[in-house]
Amino acid sequence: MKQSDLKYSSLIAVLYFGMNVNAQVTPKDTVPKEQKIEEVVMIGYGSRKKVDNTTSISSISAEEVTKTKVLNASQAIQGKAAGVQVIASDLPGSTPTVMIRGLGTVTGGRTPLYVVDGMFLSNINNINSNDILTYDILKDAAALAIYGNRAANGVIIITTKSGKGKLNVTYDGLVGVRTPLKTVSMANASEFANYNNIALGTNKFSSNQPVDTDWFKEITRTGMYNQHNLSISGASESVKYFFSLSNYDEQSILRGTDFNRATIRSNNEFKIAKGITLSQNFSVAFTKTTPKPLDAFTTAYKQSPIVPVRFPSGQFGVPFVNANGVVDYSGSKFNDVGNPVSQLFFNNEKNKNTLLQGGLKLDVDILKGLKFTSQFNGEYSNYKAYNFTDALGVWLAADPTRVASGYNASDPVNTLSNTREDYYNWALTNYLTYNKKFGAHDIEATIGTETTVRNGIDQLIVKRKNLLLNDQNYWNLNGTDYVNNVQSLTSIKFDRNTTTSYFARAQYKLMNRYLLSATIRRDGSSQFADGQKWGTFPSFGAGWVVSEEDFMKDGFFNLLKLRGGWGKLGNQNVPLNYLPLNSGTTYNYGFGNANNVSNGITVNKGYDPVLGWEVTEETSAGIDFGVLNNRLTGTIDAYNRETTNLILGITNYITSGQSETYYSHVGAVRNRGLEFSLNWADKIGQDWSYSIGGNYSLNQNRLTRVDTQKNIAQLSGGDLGNGQWTKLFNGTTVGHALGSFYLWEYDGVDANGNMKYKDLNGNGITGSADAGDRKYFDSYIPKSTLGINVSLTYKNWDFAANGYGAFGFKVYNGKKAQRINGENIESSVANDYWSASNPNASNPRPATGIPIASTYFLEDGDYFRINNITIGYTIKDIAKYVKSIKLYVSAINPVVWQKYSGYSSELSGYSATDAQAEGNPYKLAGVELNSYPTLRSFVFGLNVNF
């Protein structure tokens, strides 16, 4: 990056139209045009003045990213950019789901490409937010095409800080407390007993219970977290340097769940000679996690309050009820739900990861206006984990009457699983950039090549049994009896992916008002078979700065720019296309004689010879404007994005003799939308400045076509773990959004208070699970989102607040829908159910059995939440070597307004055991089951600048 670009980027917090907290508006006629500092945005392999850009890019400053004190920077941008939806879990170490302009694929992932200082990453969990300088989000295809095969889900370019000026030392530290933002009121002991007695038709449970356990309180605690950041930076004529240390530590609300991340970053720039600059960046992150099973939240929801945490003997409470209707050591078991405290107690696992990332960048000025850039980036990850299971202890805890002598001698007393994973990825980029101005013409051209290698993960998992001691100090492999004690050994080298790319971009400006840009990238990927490896991804854009025309010079608009573009994007993150050979297949040639057999090899799946890239095309148009001396600024964008060759699973017909699913191009998905951003910024006198901004996005997601000539493998998603599922994908999904719920439609109750469902196929069945009566309902993907940002400064005081809302989507209350006989219910259900004396109740009569997947459990997910409120006070010029001290307090997620009756309608479907579950439309995204609650945090912080 140019030295001037870094300088300009550091001033984005002052000049950016949506984020300006200290805007000083000077009358237009008092500021010579040549003195204005232009905002610069990152566009991939370079930067450009925002006014000259023809594409849709949202820029967020470092101040906005760090203002919300959360672990992951992507969580902090929620509500800051139109068209960008962030669904975050507050579980420490989880990855937020970021969707840019909707969801365009089923099997091709949802994660945008992160480009951090030129390095390609799939997430930024390892990055300290305090190290970020700028956060640029490329949204339309005209901007994204420069990244070709990686850009179908959007691109986020992150530039980390570098040194400037004199030596500067900054410390930022905070401590915070966290509690659930919303809890669910469950039935107490007497309500539980009354409800279940009615459901069973007998007085099995006493109405006078000695125990009333609040299981949610028993498995949670007040969360605590702290973070400490120290940075040293500066610059001389020949060197720029930036060094930072950070440590984040959290004890989360789920008891026993701990997280720690320490990071080190070093960014340096050396002017080797005139016109030759070498830049180096390096970071390392050490992460340690003590996870606990998230299904403990569901277990706590379901377990009865009449069960004690522990019996007087110290043994864990279990759901046995005696003849008096009270829980006892033995008796009749009334549900199959475990003890959630016991579940956490016996879970013993730890993970740690070391991630190193770094790169070198060489810039050489060959001729005036012609620069050569060569950049190498690499990353190495090393992951270690263990999971110990005390099988005997778990067995004994499930029944207080059990004794160790009754344990099955053939079952392992305990097991230990050790996991080791590592990988190494690298990329090499070389490109030339040419800039030339002559007369009214301004030309910039870039041409380059790129090679990336993503080495597959090396994974080794060893599972042993019957360790002598339940002490991790003795958990090593030395002296292990492999034959008798190793239950399983898994050693996998995952597929290696290499990509070779050629790219070029030209940008032209005439008379500071007419703008043209064109990009082309050609990618070859090892992901595909011969003949399908290469894809070409072009784009073009055009803009007209109308306010630069003579007839607009002194008009109402300080800025009025029209822009539009078209582009094509690729997605190589799709299933591999290969023909597996199944060996050991038995063929009988004995015509009924079982002894006449032969072993052979067969191909058990189909193969599509033309399977290649998923390709997305997008057409977009936008308006940028500023009026009233740029105090009021805004943008309007419209887009139409379509993936026309969607890759889905195919199953051959039975007559083919092949049963495995293979993949082919069989469908199309479309996203259409509008985006609006508006901001007012002003200054009152010398002491007051303020800004009020908002953004609003509309998106329509639709599966528009499937190839009915192919036998599409059905996806039954949103599994509730009780035999019920909530989502469907097959040929009937056309016309609906991805991830739409597929349910029976609840139609009130019959004369006896039992649930009934609408008879859609006309066969007269309304009270049972008639498969022909299911239909599609709305998806978990919001139709619209809203972000509001407010800031105010007065002398040394500063105030900031922002909020985020999502609307027009559904969520499924999976906890509530799992309930069967003897499990707890919500207090609202226990106090308002159908009876002869209450026929208009909100809920049907108490019943046993597994409820079917219906709209009774489907709720509006609409919500609006205050994401952050921060108040700070800065003391300046305290001492010779102390430039400033700032004290601040923050409230994160202090208030939410939502219709949903559960914990949270912001449900990414995060799973600690399934990396593909995050945001997957056909897993638990939008289903509240085994999910971590949204948290409210209060933070106290100190910032010292030396």
Image (tube, rainbow, N blue to C red):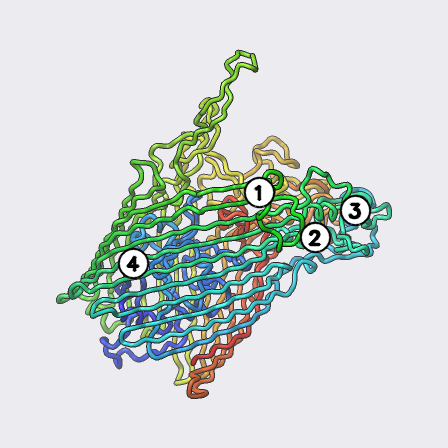
Q: Quadrant of the C terminus?
A: bottom left
Q: Nearer the viewer, mark 2 or mark 1?
A: 2
Q: Earlier in the sequence, mark 3 or mark 2?
A: 3
Amino acid under disc 1? Asp
Q: How many marks?
A: 4
Q: Nearer the viewer, mark 4 or mark 1?
A: 4
Q: Nearer the viewer, mark 2 or mark 4?
A: 4
Give SS at disc 4. Answer: strand
Q: Earlier in the sequence, mark 4 or mark 3?
A: 3
Picture quadrant where residue 850 is located: top right
Q: Which mark is residue 719?
A: 1
CA neighbours of label 4 inside 10 A, class few (<14), some (14 to 19), many (20+): many
8 up-or-down from 428: above or below = below
Provide residue 333's location: percent of width, then percent of height.
Answer: 77, 43
Which residue in the structure is indicated by mark 4? Answer: 375
Q: Earlier in the sequence, mark 2 or mark 4?
A: 2
Picture quadrant where residue 747 is located: top right
Provide residue 212's location: percent of width, then percent of height.
Answer: 77, 57
Amino acid under disc 2? Ser
CA distance separating discs 3 and 1: 29 Å
Give SS at disc 1. Answer: loop
CA neighbours of label 2 inside 10 A, class few (<14), some (14 to 19), many (20+): many
Q: Earlier in the sequence, mark 2 or mark 1?
A: 2
Which residue in the structure is indicated by mark 3? Answer: 320
Q: Nearer the viewer, mark 3 or mark 1?
A: 3
- Please tell me which residue is depicted at 62% across the width and 36% down the height of the picture: 769
Give SS at disc 3. Answer: strand
CA distance separating discs 3 and 2: 16 Å
CA distance separating discs 2 and 1: 25 Å
